[in-house]
Amino acid sequence: MQDIFGHLAGLRRPRLLVRTARIGARDYSRRRDLKRILGYGSLPKPAAAVMRLLDLEYDHNRQRETGDAGYSLTRHVDVLIALMGEADGLRRPKLQVA
């Protein structure tokens, strides 16, 4: 799990992007939002979800940096919101609310 937090600590993204995601993370609902982002089906455990979200976020960030025409700012923020929500759930597992 320390490796996950190491990856999260190493993320460097534009301040406005992070601030927007932090605001959205206040209303994060694992059941509603994670299913929408990762697809329908059973929800992965928080650590597995964070790893999948990290992969998605890296892809979105690469698209942002290269100016890819398929880049979606909204989708990138959604993934960051879920990543923050899941990371918070890992830090405080007893407070996890579905």
Image: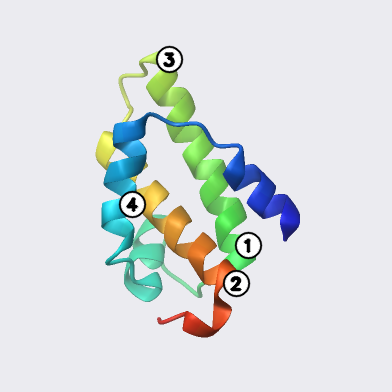
Q: Earlier in the sequence, mark 4 or mark 2?
A: 4
Q: Which residue is mark 4?
A: 22
Residue plotted at (41% across, 64% down)? 34
Q: Earlier in the sequence, mark 4 or mark 1?
A: 4
Q: Amino acid at mark 2?
A: Lys
Numbered mark located on residue 45 in the image: 2
For the residue labelled by badge 3, is the local secondary structure a helix, a strand or a loop? helix
Q: Position of residue 84 (x, y in %)?
A: 45, 56
Q: Amino acid at mark 4?
A: Arg
CA gap between label 4 and label 1 equals 21 Å
Q: Earlier in the sequence, mark 4 or mark 3?
A: 4
Q: Amino acid at mark 1?
A: Ala
Numbered mark located on residue 66 in the image: 3
For the residue labelled by badge 4, is the local secondary structure a helix, a strand or a loop? helix
Q: Position of residue 62 (x, y in %)?
A: 48, 25
Please determine whether, in this image, residue 68 is positioned above or below residue 23. Answer: above
- How many neighbours does mark 2 have within 10 angstroms: few (below 14), some (14-19), or many (20 or more)? few
Using the image as rendered, state which of residue 89 and residue 60 is in the foreground.
89
Using the image as rendered, state which of residue 41 and residue 88 is in the foreground.
88
Q: Which residue is mark 1?
A: 48
Nearer the observer: mark 4 or 2; the answer is: 4
Q: Earlier in the sequence, mark 3 or mark 1?
A: 1
| Left or right relative to 54: residue 96 | left
Residue plotted at (41% across, 57% down)? 82
CA gap between label 4 and label 2 equals 22 Å
| Left or right relative to 77: residue 46 | right
Q: Position of residue 13 (x, y in %)?
A: 44, 31
| Left or right relative to 68: residue 41 | right
Mark 2 vs 3: CB contact within 8 A:
no
Q: Amino acid at mark 3?
A: Thr
CA gap between label 2 and label 3 equals 32 Å
Mark 1 vs 2: CB contact within 8 A:
yes
